Image (cartoon, helix red, strand yellow):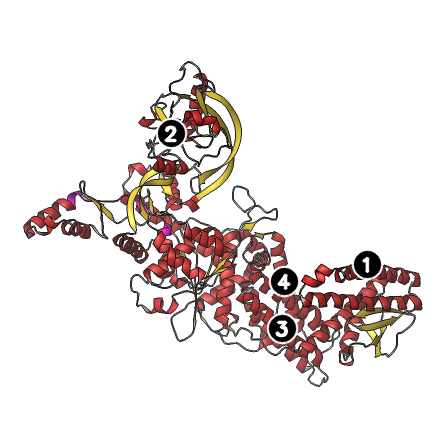
Amino acid sequence: MSISTKYNPQETEEKWYSYWLDKRFFHSEPDEREPYTIVIPPPNVTGVLHMGHMLNNTIQDVLIRKARMQGKNACWVPGTDHASIATEAKVVAMLKEKGINKKDITREEFLKYAWEWKEKYGGIILEQLKKLGASCDWDRTRFTMEEDLSDAVINSFIHLYKKGNIYRGVRMVNWDPAGKTAVSDEEVIRKEVNQKLYYIHYHITGTDKDTLDHTTCLTIATTRPETIMADSAICINPNDERYKHLHGKKVFVPLINREIPIILDDYVEMDFGTGCLKVTPAHDLNDYELGLKHHLLVIDILNDDGTLNDKAEILVGEDRFIARKKIAKMLEEAGHLEKVEDYKSQVGFSERTDAVIEPKLSLQWFSKMEELAKPALEEVLNGEVKLIPEKFINTYRHWMENVKDWCISRQLWWGQRIPAWYFQHEEPVVAKTKEEAIEELINRVPERREWSEESKAGFRKQAEEFITQDEDVMDTWFSSWLWPISVFDGFKNPNNKDFNYYYPTNDLVTAPEILFFWVARMIMAGKEFTGKKPFTNVYLTGIVRDKLGRKMSKSLGNSPDPIGLIEQYGADGVRVGMLMSSPAGNDLMFDEAYCEQGRNFANKIWNAFRLVKGWEVDASLANPNEQAIAWFESRFSEALTEIEHNFKQYRLSEALMATYKLVWDDFCAWYLEMVKPAYQQPVDTVTRAASVKFFEQILTLLHPFMPFITEELYHDELFGERSEMECCIVADYPTIGDVNDALLKEAELVKGLVSEIRNIRNTRQISPKEALELNIKVNSGVTYEKWLNIVCKLANISKAEVVSDKVTGAAGFMVGKDEFFIPLSQNIDVEAEKERLTKELEYLQGFLKSVDAKLGNERFVQNAKPEIIQNERNKKADAESKISTIQESLAAL
């Protein structure tokens, strides 16, 4: 099989992904093997691939491919989230383009359009993941609103309601006036915006009505003058001497002249603003808490769409932001506005509609979280569920110990509908179907239970006509918190073989910003509904940022198109680029140059393969380079030990870098240079066989990171004939062999020696083609004789011998404890050599001085670890030895 001169990622990727799918390598069924399971954090059906997805799914694919090669039954379950708000917004926009208003159609008609939209666009992101090489078990693809998963959501709601964990009540929520729904905290984006701070006079009762100054008024500063009509009190700190005379007094709300009390609470900071706070319980979360504490009146002046309602008394029907400007003008005209200042503050915006979030009291369904949180916190604190990096444990603990009730209802149509039913003025009934709800209506009232069957039948008929289901749907997270259970039908049949085999799953890879909103809730659900944790390890990736440190986003225009990157650099190149810039658990500064480096790495592997494949073999040749072969065998195992350690620590970036250095530096730059035959000369059988074996090991080691190029090369005839199922994707992952530490140390000295000789050539402008002689004075006990063939080959040494004394008139240097001399030919510039050695001597003398200062510092010697002190002493001895050698070389010159 001929191999092209250049690697073509597009051809390779399409070919092998189709092949893997055709041979069903991604598919998993329960068997006798150890399972290794990952469930994908389901992307929104509205989504397209972004850089965060690229990072997250590259990591998952590396883990799943490695486990598959290690003989585990690897199962990666894909799927998508129905994303209530986002999808509904997309469908509403689509209908608008068709001239259809959501208000003008029925719920059933709307849902028909929504399902059509989902079928057309909902799978885009999963198809894009295939371009990345994601080896998901696509046969197991799930969707959070498919029938079985929706049943799980409904049944979970009913279960928690019957336990007393779910209730209906009026609470403060994040309200999206554009979407006209409550939204969760994680769907609120905080942005710093330029605002105005309005200083408003509130007239104190019992003072001169015609005077508006500091003797008759309290002044408060607010960014929201449009809400003053909802004020219930003015709050001051009881210890504020400036306002002691106002304790027990009242003020009038400007423009509407409603009387409100002055209340006392140390919540108010005396040195912030004017030290006075207007309390508007219906339109601010903190004010709401103050209102509950002081039993204040709650006046909600905003409609669901953000316009003012009748309770505002003025500007009824105006949008809140238009009302703000008009109120400011009215206050100024009435003499109630003291001044206006520019002000910057954080404001919440709806992630989906970009509308400014309105804190709003609303009748919603809530889930009590305190009892659910306790076992979920314990699972993390006792190490049953590991958070990686561990720095997130404290954040997790803080959230869980301060957990608040969860608003689980949303004013939407797309999603699992709340299973609550209303009949006349009775308390709502929670049941799965209308029929069950009607039976509950009968059974929960003692008198009805005693009715005759005829009376019950009449009641059922009446209820059938008048009972209605709650219009709201459940929060999207209320379905996704069940994801690890429901994807294996653990609710439908807890004893099914898939659920018993794959659950609990092994690893979860996700973003730290949803540690509480999703990860913690999944642990809660796992403990509540199965008694088990949902996963063992949670790897929390960083946020993808640009090279300036800014979070990548559409609005900044700093996020590259992932598919475009794959087309330009190949999927393997992009995968390597993502991981190279991704230190464990920290934000990554992504630079497209990393993808270019990944592509270059693929080309390096390709060219190295072409080199080995191009060797001709002469079976009659003897004397294989056993020293190089033995060294690389040990080096491979040493590197694999480091790589495996990094994998266990979930340091995938470090694991990749160790692999990269092994391949690029040790294999390509050193091993192949050591063993490759001279130009147009053959190689011996043993060396070629060893090199082919090493290359095959490298391909299997690289496969989780770079699946496409490795699969392509794995099938080359160089490795012998393969059956159609003998693929790199299921090849045995390398195992750690023996490591000869002494051999590795010698090899490092030899590599250092070759590098020094090459450096001498560079600094003295000696051509690489000009052969040099080398004399070696061994002080360390290293046996250089067995390495001389390699040194002579790599450094173009014509003659090398071990000597017992220093060589005069030669360029001298040290590697470790050993001294090396290259006799200087007549064309060497002696003065330049003296200058070079003098500079090196000055550097070493300065270095020795700094080491002596450190060792002379009593505090350092007393407090430092013994191994650190010994390391400094070793540095001192090494510097002294090198200084001595340089001084002797200078004397000889």
| Residue 78 can be seen in this image | no
Identify the residue position indicated by label 2 in the image: 233
The answer to whether 620 appears left or right of 347 in the picture is right
Tally of numbered discs: 4
- Pointer 2 local density, CA inside 10 Å: few below 14, some 14–19, many at least 20: many
The kind of residue on which mark 3 rests is: Glu
Q: CA distance from mark 4 to mark 3?
A: 21 Å
Identify the residue position indicated by label 1 in the image: 846
Quadrant location of the C terminus?
Answer: bottom right
Residue 601 — which label?
4
Q: CA distance from mark 4 to mark 2?
A: 68 Å
Identify the residue position indicated by label 3 in the image: 638
Q: CA distance from mark 1 to mark 2?
A: 72 Å
Element type where label 3 sits in the image: helix
Q: Range of the magenta residues?
A: 464-477
* Corner quadrant of residue 502: bottom left
Q: CA distance from mark 3 to mark 2?
A: 72 Å
Q: CA distance from mark 4 to mark 1?
A: 39 Å
Q: Is residue 824 above or below residue 485?
A: below
Q: Is residue 698 above or below residue 370?
A: below
> N-terminal of the two: label 3 or label 2?
2
